[in-house]
Image (spheres, rainbow, N blue to C red):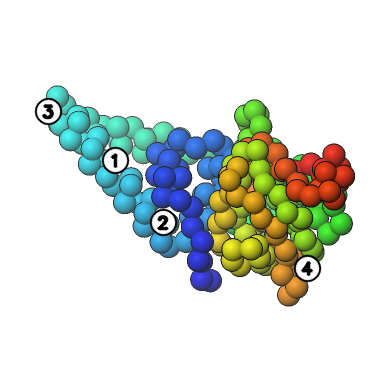
């Protein structure tokens, strides 16, 4: 698998620090699980944080960092909530490991060729995560966003006016990005999306159908 599109480095740094929302963290985790380049970046950030913590604690308590790590190792390891129910769902059996720990809602029709399935996370305002399945050739008309959107391709591919996004790629969009997505003709596309805010569809058709499309 060749991954060509990655998260911005500031998002990766926030991911390594545990500073992202639950929805954003999930999408970045799925990408990082498949991307050796981003794994190296996250590992380096973790090592730098450890060095900084060691330097900060060394003058007062030379064994503080080792004590913290030992305490973490002693903590009981529990099975992530929801993993058993995901294992029993054949539709989700091939999803990346971070998604195996999640609970899902039911598939819901969005538009011709598009269905979505919510991921049941801790309520967090308008931040949410969901799966989006598109049939070959399906087009999501020109739109922008009222917030940020992170999209990780789980299967298949799609194109927009800038590039082609394939399995493992991560696409970042914000209020300044306006695009039109088209699922490739060679097969269906399944994406994991974290979204803040809503879609804002462009053009006359967009204004007409906007009340009926909810992602």
Looking at the image, residue 139 sits to the left or right of residue 72; the answer is right
Question: In which image quadrant can residue 156 be found?
Answer: bottom right
Observer-side mark, 1 or 4, equals 4
| Disc 3: which residue | 59
Rendered residue at 50%/66% (across/down): 4
Looking at the image, residue 214 sits to the left or right of residue 176; the answer is right
Q: CA distance from mark 3 to mark 4?
A: 61 Å
Question: In which image quadrant can residue 198 be found?
Answer: top right
Can the viewer see residue 103?
A: no
**Disc 4 packing (10 Å; few <14; some 14–19; many ≥20):** some
Can the viewer see residue 215?
A: yes
| Disc 4: which residue | 136
The tag earlier along the polypeptide, 1 or 4, is 1
Check disc 4 and report its element: helix, strand or loop. Answer: loop
Q: CA distance from mark 3 to mark 2?
A: 31 Å
**Disc 2 packing (10 Å; few <14; some 14–19; many ≥20):** some
Rendered residue at 59%/66% (across/down): 163
The tag earlier along the polypeptide, 2 or 1, is 2
Kindly check if marks 2 and 4 are in contact, taking CB atoms under 8 A apart as contact: no
Q: CA distance from mark 1 to mark 4?
A: 44 Å
Question: In which image quadrant can residue 142 be found?
Answer: bottom right
Looking at the image, residue 23 sits to the left or right of residue 156; the answer is left
Check disc 2 and report its element: helix, strand or loop. Answer: helix
Kindly check if marks 2 and 1 are in contact, taking CB atoms under 8 A apart as contact: no
| Disc 1: which residue | 49
Q: CA distance from mark 2 to mark 4?
A: 31 Å
The tag earlier along the polypeptide, 3 or 4, is 3
**Disc 3 packing (10 Å; few <14; some 14–19; many ≥20):** few
Judge by depth and name the residue closer to the eye, 97 or 203: 203
- Which label is found at residue 39? 2
């Amino acid at each position: 698998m060749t991954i060509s599109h990655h998260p911005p480095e500031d998002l990766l740094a926030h991911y390594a620090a545990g500073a992202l929302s639950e929805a954003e963290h999930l999408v970045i985790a799925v990408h990082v699980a498949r991307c050796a380049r981003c794994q190296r970046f996250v590992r380096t950030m973790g090592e730098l944080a450890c060095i900084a913590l060691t330097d900060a604690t060394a003058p007062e308590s030379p064994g503080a960092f080792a004590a913290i790590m030992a305490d973490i190792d002693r903590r009981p390891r529990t099975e992530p909530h929801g993993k058993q129910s995901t294992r029993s769902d054949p539709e989700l059996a091939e999803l990346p490991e971070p998604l195996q720990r999640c609970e899902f809602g039911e598939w819901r029709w969005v538009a011709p060729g598009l269905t979505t399935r919510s991921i049941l996370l801790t309520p967090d305002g308008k931040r949410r995560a969901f799966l989006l399945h598109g049939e070959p050739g399906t087009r999501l008309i020109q739109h922008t966003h009222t917030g940020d959107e992170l999209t990780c391709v789980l299967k298949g591919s799609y194109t927009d006016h800038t590039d082609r996004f394939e399995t493992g790629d991560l696409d970042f969009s914000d209020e300044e990005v306006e695009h039109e997505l088209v699922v490739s003709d060679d097969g269906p596309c399944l994406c994991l999306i974290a979204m803040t805010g809503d879609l804002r569809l462009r053009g006359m058709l967009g204004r007409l159908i906007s009340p009926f499309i909810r992602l």
